[in-house]
Amino acid sequence: MGVSIIIVNYNTKDLLVSCIESIRKYCLRTPYEIIVVDNASTDDSVNELLKVDPNVVLISNLENKGFGTANNQGVRIAMYDYIFLLNSDTILESDVIANLELFMNDHIDCAGVTPRILFPDRTEQNTYGNFPTSTFFTLNSLGIIELLSNNIKRKFSIGLPVDFERTRKVPHILGVAMFLRKSIFDLVGGFDENFFLYFEETDLCYRISQLGYSFFVIPNLYILHFLSKSSPTNVFKTKHLLRSRLYYFKKHRLRGFWIIKTLSFMKLIMLSIIKRDFNYLHLLVKIQKI
């Protein structure tokens, strides 16, 4: 069948090169192509990429279009039946891709699968999660979630590390490494481009799961994730995190939208006071329109 590996890049030149080199080294048993969508990087990523691997299919955007939109661009030109949406700050250490493909071939009800995601020191990183609820965000905002037992946290948390040894069905997988059937991705219309950053993969998995398809984690496969710093400021992160969270709840008409909106207002007011940065109050005005 083959795999189209799609990597969105924004100012992660060195990490991107390392990622692609690891793919070339370990992806040996299945046909594949690498599609890089560059979101207007200013660190010479494009030139460096073409020096290292001129065979990469490259889309160069004139502006940062965000994670979901850029991935959609890559998927539209993908030639294979499977797509592997991979962060630019990841490294392969084995032929993970061929093994993910084999699993998908054997599980026709599976829409997507992910390997275990580890930090470079091999400690666990969040790999999957539950779909968001107002209960989780309320408990998290009040600092209560950390006081709960691990068993209870597993029922609520939207980001969880792997703590099991056998392949398991999960509510949704994270955008770090999403191995998906292109046909199902296309069926639901891909990523909702109203999300610029955060919650876009949650929304995608939610819409796919509504059609009866499943997602899995394979814990005996792993990749390393370096957590790049491509998002420039805390204000930037807060803006898109809160906006995407509210949009997700409103879009799917989930209970607790107004609770989430009130908590978001309170957080922005507190941040503006604690950090003495009134940009957070400007965000409050923008979020009020959602």
Image: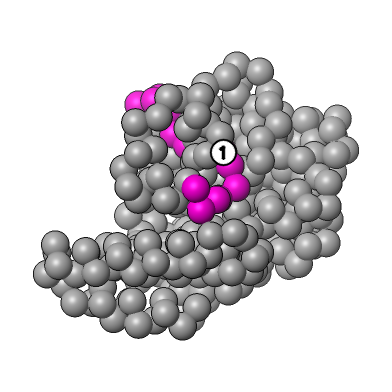
What is the magenta range?
A: 121-135
The picture quadrant where one finds residue 18 is top left
In the rendered image, residue 272, in percent from the top left (x then y), is placed at: 19, 69
In the rendered image, residue 80, in percent from the top left (x then y), is placed at: 79, 53
Q: Is 133 one of the magenta-colored residues?
A: yes
**Left or right: 153 in relation to 164:** left
Vertical side of 161 occupied by 267: above or below: below
**Left or right: 271 in relation to 115:** left
In the rendered image, residue 197, in percent from the top left (x then y), is placed at: 48, 64
For disc 1, the marked residue is 128
Q: What secondary structure characterizes most of the magenta part?
A: loop
User: Quarter of the image containing the N terminus?
Assistant: top right
Q: Is 175 one of the magenta-colored residues?
A: no
- Residue 133 can be seen, yes or no: yes
Q: Nearer the viewer, residue 255 or 192?
A: 255
The picture quadrant where one finds residue 25 is top right
Q: Nearer the viewer, residue 145 or 104?
A: 145
The three-letter amino acid code for the residue at tag 1 is Tyr
The picture quadrant where one finds residue 172 is top right
What's the residue at 51%, 53% (across, down)?
134
